[in-house]
Amino acid sequence: MKVFTDRRVIEGTRGSYRIIEMVKRGGMGWLYKAVDEAGNMVIVKIPSLELKENLEALSYRLKRECRALRLLSHKNIVKYIDEGELCLENGATIPFLVMEYVKGKSLEEMGRLEPGKALDIFKQVADAIAYMHSRGVVHGDIKPRNVIVSERPVIIDFGTATFMDYPTEMREVYLTPKWAAPEHLEMKLFTKQGDIYQLGMLLFYMLTGNCPKDYMVRWELKEEASKVLPRDVKGIYSILRKALSYNLQDRYNDVNELLSSLDEALGYDIIATVEFEGRKYQISDFARIGREEDNEIVIKGPYIHRYHCALIREEGKFYIYQGVFNIVKGRPVRKKVYDIAKWKYNLPHIIRNGRYIPVTDKEELKDGDVIALCYSKRKGPYKILSIKIKKVPRL
């Protein structure tokens, strides 16, 4: 059945979309490339029309997918844009979903990855799943084909998404058995433990290029599987076994517990990235900031001290110190602390949750913090730096 005439424009609740071409004809849904009113590329999804007797069930499933994506807003989850209804030739109506267009390669296409890259992608995906669970949503179909990597990994295809309040709601299961958790197929049960099982499978695939079920007996990972893991990450075999346990209660309680176990098994370094006026500086240990050329980050300005402040890693955390630091035997040593009464404006402030926190001595930095090197209510912030902090596996 031809759903769209050439260049058909459809109306959603938030705008209109011009259909360009079909990009995928799946068993559960058909995907079309489209353009919104601003000229941005989007994806439009409708229920599959192959089997008309399943249309009602597939329409219900797509509406549930719309509901799930409306609840979610995360950089590693495909963005919900809009939804609406289409009228077919026979007078029936079907729902449609409009999503972000994600250009890139799937993990399935990428195959085995270098361990550091695999773990970086995995942690971003796992963080998105943890967020999803905090919103009461279970994905249910995490597999290499459903993670697209462009500038960032993005989880797509929420056609099997369910809600924690209704873990057995899925009566008709459309899954790839190769990537399904045992309870998906045996009990049609969808919980966060099923997502944890699939995360374990995803990690094994990224590290080896193989599906872990090729190394399983009765749903459990065999010892042989440890031999195909890269040498640098063989310590995570026990973590994979736990994530891939047959019994739900033997798996990790939640995704954060899984991630903590990974950190403990591999160890990690913490890296800070400072961005100022489009330039990025990566800091693994420390960086002094000021006007003088021997600072690690040189920032000129009439209100900036020659040696303004320093960012220093201590015991797995980054701190910002005000004052003058000398380098002694490769480490920063504070020589002078600025008088708060005298230099009230010329002190760094952390901007966090709408508050300006003065650095009178030292303050711990958080991922996403913004630093104003100077600030007062009358003059406002001066010389703005953004901070990103992340854990990097020690391989």
Image (spheres, rainbow, N blue to C red):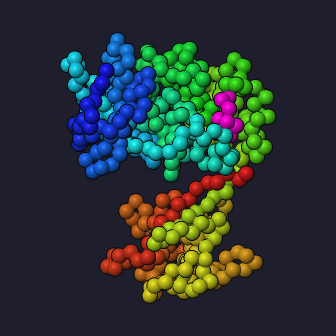
At 60% across and 23% down in the image, what residue appears?
178
Q: In front here: 98 or 130?
A: 98
Q: In front here: 162 or 225?
A: 225
> Does the image show residue 147?
yes
Instruction: Give residue 19's position: percent from left, percent from top.
Output: 30, 37
Instruction: Give residue 303's position: percent from left, percent from top.
Output: 44, 85
**Number of callouts in the render?**
0
Is 309 part of what is drawn in magenta?
no
Instruction: Give residue 15's position: percent from left, percent from top.
Output: 23, 42
Instruction: Give residue 344's position: percent from left, percent from top.
Output: 43, 81
Which image quadrant for residue 225?
Answer: top right
At 63% across and 32% down in the image, what residue appears?
201
Q: From the viewer's perspective, tell me whether residue 385 is left or right of residue 4.
A: right
> If the image is split into quadrants, where does the N terminus sit?
top left
- Principal secondary structure, stretch drawn in magenta: helix
Which image quadrant for residue 364?
Answer: bottom right
Is 207 part of what is drawn in magenta?
yes
Q: From the viewer's perspective, tell me whether residue 20 is left or right of residue 238.
A: left
Q: In front here: 62 or 366?
A: 62
Residue at the left extreme of this rendering = 91
Whether 246 is drawn above or below 100: the answer is above
At 43% across and 15% down in the image, what residue appears?
171
Tell me which segment is drawn in magenta: 205-212
Q: From the viewer's perspective, tell me whether residue 332 is left or right of residue 253.
A: right
Q: In front here: 34 or 349?
A: 34
Residue at the top extreme of this rendering = 53
Which image quadrant for residue 284?
Answer: bottom right
> Does the image show residue 71?
no
At 35% across and 42% down in the image, what residue appears?
42
Q: From the viewer's perspective, tell me whether residue 35 is left or right of residue 102.
A: left
Whether 290 is drawn above or below 241: the answer is below
